Amino acid sequence: MRSTAHADPPRTQLRLTSEGLAWLGAAVLLGALGWFKSLNLLLLLAYAMLALLALNGILTRVHTRRVRATPLAVPPVHAGEEVRIGVRVENVGNLAATVGVTDLSDGTARQWVLDRLPAHSAVECVERQVFPRRGRFAVAAPVVRSGTPT
């Protein structure tokens, strides 16, 4: 019999923002132009831009891996009642982390930005909501993101 007490951590994905895609496009354009025209300075600039993009990705991953977000338990409510919905964000690392948290429960996107969350601390990000009808509502796993490490 297998124990399920220690579940694997969720997989993380690196997604480029629109600014990151523009940065990558500019680096590729400069690299192609430098290669075609044999301009070494443009090639060096393109390589430096790609290295900075990779470094930003690594630092972003470090920031998001030290933060855990879990949805708060919601008690049974009746239609029209106000209830607290949110996530508990915990920094398990040894350094402060600046992250954004998105909760997509019940189809509504709620977003919070936590600036310099202290090491080994936890914060509850809560919003009040009224459910218009009876029934079950889906609870999605919160998404932790970071775009600019500090």
Image (cartoon, rainbow, N blue to C red):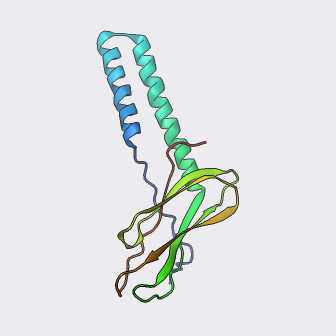
* Number of numbered callouts drawn: 0
Which residue occupies the foreground of this view, 7 or 61?
61
Quarter residue 130 falls in: bottom left
In the image, residue 79 lies at what x, y percent?
A: 39, 87
In the image, residue 105 lies at what x, y percent?
A: 41, 71
When the figure is inspected, residue 76 is found, relative to residue 95, above or below; the finding is: below
When the figure is inspected, residue 145 is found, relative to residue 46, above or below; the finding is: below
- Tell me the residue at 52%/54% (across/down): 100
Which residue occupies the foreground of this view, 29 or 43?
29
Quarter residue 38 falls in: top left
- Tell me the residue at 35%/15% (across/down): 34
Quarter residue 135 falls in: bottom left
Q: Which residue lies furthest to the left in this view?
A: 36
- Tell me the residue at 62%/51% (across/down): 97
**Is 51 left or right of 24, judged from the image as shown?**
right
In the image, residue 5 lies at what x, y percent?
A: 56, 77
In the image, residue 78 lies at what x, y percent?
A: 43, 89
Quadrant where the image shows the C terminus = top right
**Is 32 left or right of 2, judged from the image as shown?**
left
Which residue occupies the foreground of this view, 115 or 45?
115
